[in-house]
Image: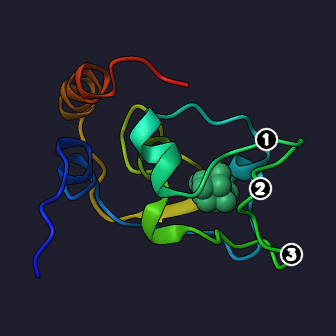
Amino acid sequence: MRQDKTPIQRLYDRIPKTRCKAGCFRCCINYVQMAKEERERMGGYEWNGRCPHLTSDGKCGVYDARPLVCRIYGSSELLLCPDCECGEPLSEEETRSMLREYLKEADKLI
Ligand code: SF4
Ligand code: SF4
């Protein structure tokens, strides 16, 4: 049975794919804010100096359920990462528009 995506999951579909530098997990030691539904989807988030979903070999253990902030960094002209590859990043305008939609849907970030 097909499960409908939430508006936030539909935003994910508009974010270009990136490829991180091998072995880099610099983003995953920062505290990450997200919508309540994203936190639930990834099975909770108890930051302890790094993301609890970072695996011992430095990979994302909830890749398909990672929140928007983990997806958009490196994928936008406003949030470019010098160490990751992205074919065609979102423009500044697209990024601002997406973040406005996200904040509206998220209600508040936790
Ligand atoms: S986005 Fe950049 S800084 Fe973050 S984990 Fe990937 S390569 Fe590292
Ligand atoms: S959810 Fe995945 S990508 Fe995001 S901070 Fe945690 S380990 Fe890193």
Q: Quadrant of the N terminus?
A: bottom left
Contact (Cβ within 8 Å) of mark 3 with mark 1: no
The tag on residue 56 is 3
Q: Ligand 1 sits in which quadrant?
A: bottom right
Element on which disc 1 rests: loop
Density class for disc 1 (Cα within 10 Å; few <14, some 14-19, many ≥20) is some
Q: Nearer the viewer, residue 27 or 92?
A: 27
Q: Amino acid at mark 1?
A: Trp
Secondary structure under tag 2 reads loop
Label located before the other in sequence (3 or 1): 1
Identify residue for label 2: 52
The answer to whether mark 1 and mark 2 are in CB contact below 8 A is yes
Q: Position of residue 19 (x, y in %)?
A: 50, 71
Residue 65: percent from left, percent from top: 45, 62
Distance CA(mark 1)–CA(mark 2):
6 Å
Q: Which residue is mark 1?
A: 47
**Quick one: quadrant of the C terminus?**
top right
Q: Residue at x 79, y 41 (%)?
A: 47
Gap in Å between the C-alphas at discs 3 and 1?
15 Å
